[in-house]
Image (cartoon, helix red, strand yellow):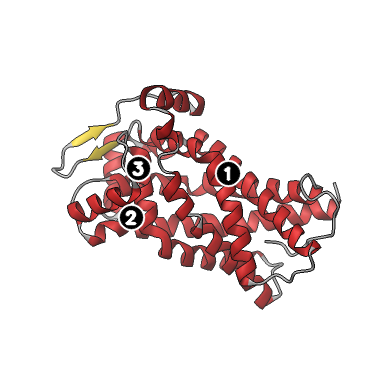
Amino acid sequence: MSDYTPVTKQLLFSRVNLIHAFSGATGSVVAMTIFYPLEIIRTRLQVDDRKDLIHLATLAAEIIRDEGWSCFYEGIRPLLISLYCSNFIYFYTYTGLKLLVSRKGLSHSAPIDLLLAAISGSVNVIITTPLWVATTRIKLQNARIRTEEGAVQTHMERYSGLTDGIVKIAREEGLYQLWSSVFSSLILVSNPAIQYMVYEMAKRRLKQTNSSLSVFLMGAFAKLISTILTYPIQVGQARQRASSRRVGLIVCLIELVQSRGVLGLYRGLETKLLQTVLTSAFMFVVYEKILLLLMKRKL
């Protein structure tokens, strides 16, 4: 995050909050658009039920053979909408809390950064979880997913968009299903919390963050650490969202270990690291550049 935190009387609706929120949301959308095919492969790996470990290249070849190249951008529109909303809320809340901390005369430290990021992530999760449940369903609705026996199954329900997806899920499966993954999402608040804590620590230590390369490397390192620590929960969450069954995170993870073994908890990790580290690093570069431009113009 940028260290630019001027004292302002309007913490809730300040210009600074809006600029950070716009910059962060735009950066995330630009980065995801570039690396979205890896996101598709990562999601497929997490919900694939075959016992044998499937590697990135193998699954990519299967997808191209069975569904064609166009499937690599299946469901990108609802995902970008969900991503923009999530990051706008996150950056807006996080910046507002940073301003509040500065107003109170507290110095920024790793524990404070972790706390502020966790609060911001929790606010984001509570508001946007239904968007992400619908987005996951849309991404998988044309997918040919392999079962444990190797058979192919396709998600039959059709959703024309986010609104249609949310309405159908609520009507046919109950409102509960829209927030079925909220528990795992709240646990996964630790992912961005750790990410932004590490990023802020790196910025304070290096004290030189103007170059795109330094921002890229700091963003990549921060995401690498947070992803490795929280990946099994992300796998469980993806399977929760893809399923129409009411199954808790713990049960989901136990079933996964029983069917695939402990390594099943890390299926798709290589793809996730490639996708999320590159996306996050590029997002921070775009975020910092847009932020610097808008701050200088004093819009």
Comes first in the chain, label 3 or label 1: 1
- Tell me residue 116's x, y (percent): 63, 59
Residue underneath mark 1: 86
Label 1 packing within 10 angstroms: few (<14), some (14-19), many (20+): many
Q: Is residue 37 above or below residue 296?
A: above
Q: Is residue 46 above or below residue 139?
A: below
Label 2 packing within 10 angstroms: few (<14), some (14-19), many (20+): many
Quadrant of the rendering where the N terminus is positioned? bottom right
Q: Which residue occupies the extreme left position in the image?
A: 149
Residue at image coords 69%, 58%: 288
Q: Secondary structure at mark 1?
A: helix
Label 3 packing within 10 angstroms: few (<14), some (14-19), many (20+): many
- Tell me residue 240's x, y (percent): 35, 42
Q: Is residue 262 above or below residue 78?
A: below
Residue underneath mark 2: 268
Type of amino acid under label 2:
Gly
